Image (spheres, rainbow, N blue to C red):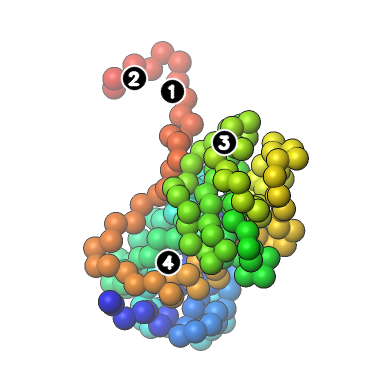
Amino acid sequence: MSETPKTILALDTAGPGCSAALWGRSAILAGRREFMARGQSERLVPMVLEVMTEAGVPFSALDMVAVSVGPGAFTGVRIGLSAAKGFSLALAIPIMAVTSFEAVAAAVPAEDRAGRLLAIALESKRDDLYLQLFDDTGRARGEPAAIEPTALSGHLPELPLLFAGDAKERAIAALGSWGDVRIFDGDDAADAAQIAALAATRDLAPGSPVGPLYLRAPDVTLPAGLDERR
């Protein structure tokens, strides 16, 4: 088992915003989070500089960079990954991947999810939504999937459920009066602070690949008349 890094820079641009946080030993030293529909590519690096300056920690002290890998907006996921790879190469430190599902699940307090299966529902910007289940200890139950709301009940077990994530209202509306289902009414947006805290609990295998988590292909429209074979 590898030694747990002590100082971690975490980044998130996969969701509806931009955030950066610095973890040192056993706590968040500094963090920033701003909600924005676009502009993460211009804001992320200045935000990182603000976090590092506030904490008074030099970049040379970083042991790892952690980043959300989606699912989320195609461009947002790529912005975070590109920045993380840049810091990794410049500082010769490893990258830890954390999914958006894991980050949102970590935002739900233990007392809220106690005795319930946690269903994380994330917006896809399409008719479907992204879903992954977690037990009340925060451990993933099954693989994530892109699911049409009308088919949602067929993917859920007969257990008390708690929904969280930015598509939770849409999921609850689709389920109607199906079973014992509650909705988490707190702040459950993914945040770099949660990503940093999760990364601090994990061991990273040398050479672990880091790439985006896409549950369906990105929307691409070719210009009219363009030969797709080119």
Q: Residues within 10 Å of mark 4 (few under 14, many from 20)?
A: many
Residue 226 image point, x, y percent: 38, 17
**Who comes first in sequence, dot 1 or dot 3?**
3
Residue lying at 57% horizontally and 63% vertically, measured from the top left: 136
Q: Residues within 10 Å of mark 2 (few under 14, many from 20)?
A: few
**Residue type beneath disc 2:** Glu
Residue 64 image point, x, y percent: 37, 73
For the residues labelled 2 and 4, say whether their Cβ atoms are less than 8 Å apart: no
Residue 24 image point, x, y percent: 47, 83
Relative vertical location of residue 187 with respect to residue 168 in this rendering, above or below = below
Q: Determine the secondary structure under disc 2.
A: loop
Between the residue at mark 3 and the residue at mark 2, the CA separation in whole angstroms equals 37 Å
For the residues labelled 2 and 1, say whether their Cβ atoms are less than 8 Å apart: yes
- Front position in the image: 148 or 124: 148
Instruction: Look at the image and tell me whether residue 5 can be seen.
Output: yes
- Using the image, tell me which numbered label, if any, was put on residue 154: 3
Q: Nearer the viewer, mark 1 or mark 3?
A: 3
- Front position in the image: 174 or 61: 174
Q: Residues within 10 Å of mark 3 (few under 14, many from 20)?
A: few
**Residue type beneath disc 3:** Gly
Q: Which picture quadrant has residue 216?
A: top left
- Using the image, tell me which numbered label, if any, was put on residue 222: 1
Residue lying at 57% horizontally and 60% vertically, measured from the top left: 105
**Who comes first in sequence, dot 2 or dot 4?**
4
